[in-house]
Amino acid sequence: MNKIIELAEENILHTYNRFQIVLDHGKGTRLYDTEGREYLDFFSGIGVYALGHGDKELNDAIKAQVDKLMHCSNLFYNEPAARAAKRLNDLTGMDKVFFTNSGAEAVEGALKAALKYAYLKDGKNDHEIIALDHSFHGRTIGALAVTGKAAYREGYKPFVADVKFGQMNDLKSVTELVNDRTCAVIMETVQGEGGIYPSDKEFIEGIYRLCQESDILLIIDEIQCGLYRTGSVYAWQQYDVKPDIMTTAKALGSGMPIGAFLLNKKVADASLKAGDHGTTYGGNPLATATADKVLELLESRHVLDNVRDLTPYLEEKLDALVRKYDCIEGRRGKGFMQGLVLKDVTPGEIVNKGIEKGILMLTAGVNVLRLLPPLVITKEDIDKMYEILDEVFA
């Protein structure tokens, strides 16, 4: 293991402070390092492994597509992309899909579509976008422009668009920013990286009404919270809202790099046209065959029922920890996207001690322990998580 870590540090650009583990393989809700040690996965590759690790039916579909066709470019049609797009539109009620290789690329495309929509409407190039503090939308320049964390933005200005920041769950802070240059509001239904902040009903529905009344586009980022994680197919479907543009990724490939942005008919008809946007690899047959199979399996195996059935039990166990330990101030989240708010102890300390005891977790914001298990966890997995965390906090 140490030799592999040394090899990586010698050759890979150090932009991550990695855990000192070399993961080798996974099965279900467990991961194993190169020394054979087992870890309960409440990390899921930052919310990616919806179906868990090593799913045979998914792997077989990927292998079959590898032997058939992996890439052809978007200058040709391919069947897996057409099928996956149809599934996404059926699940969301959206109208058009553009496949990307990642969540950040999906955000880039969403921003381009919004800016082009506004430009075609009034011929001006000075439009503004409203985003939210504590938000996270990706690491590319456009995505950074709307990411509400100063540390991530420092050193990369000027950005490609004028962006103003409101506060999550403070409708007035957003409405005060609106002017005749505002073309879009972008928000996560549940902020992940920023600290597990779910949208209040009054807030997100107020934003939706504001956008509808002023012909401002609502971009909803569901890259982390989407695809069954919070107890609905997409988290925004728990509210009386519908985005003009939405982004999705992570669980869409359950390990395969893929993302997408979806547009309603109004935006699709009056924004990006042929030649306005493109990607070499996005929408390739291998990635979209994977996404098509992931979406099929999530539905056929009733994974949403598992999330809904076990969420109360997961919350009960986490709330028991809150009551038991003074260093835990509270819990917040939705479904299988949960955070424990800590005091007098850093989430990084808990993550590291958890690794020692055989569980993988991650942090969010400055004081939140973030739990993003695969969507196929069992009651026994939750009991094991509680047992380990009880030892760690003790």
Image: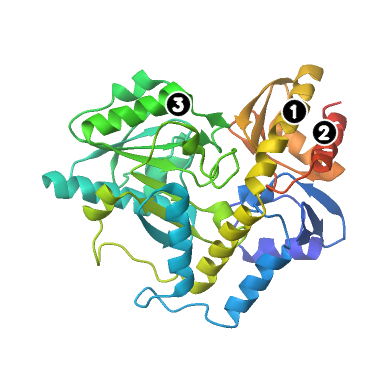
Please tell me in which quadrant of the rendered image residue 314 appears: top right
Give the spatial CA distance, label 1 vs label 3.
24 Å
> Looking at this view, is 17 or 221 the one in front?
221
Q: Residue at x 81, y 19 (%)?
A: 324
> Toward which corner of the image does residue 67 lie, by quadrant?
bottom right
- Which callout, 1 or 3, points at the residue further toward the start of the chain? 3
Give the residue type that dot 1 points to.
Leu
User: Residue drawn 79% across and 38% down?
Assistant: 382
Give me the disc on residue 386.
2
Up the image or down, 198 lies above or below 268; here it is above
146 horizontally vs 40: left or right: left
Inspect this view and state whether residue 335 appears. Answer: yes
Query: Going by the picture, which residue comes out furthest to the left?
Result: 123
Q: CA distance from mark 1 to mark 2?
A: 7 Å
Secondary structure under the numbered disc 1 in the rendered image: helix
Circle 3 sits on which residue?
168
Per the image, the residue denoted by label 1 is: 318
Upstream in sequence: badge 2 or badge 3:
3
Badge 1 crowding class, 10 Å Cα cut-off, few under 14, some 14 to 19, many 20 or more, is many
**In the rendered image, which quarter contains the C terminus?**
top right
Please tell me how many numbered marks the rendered image carries. Answer: 3
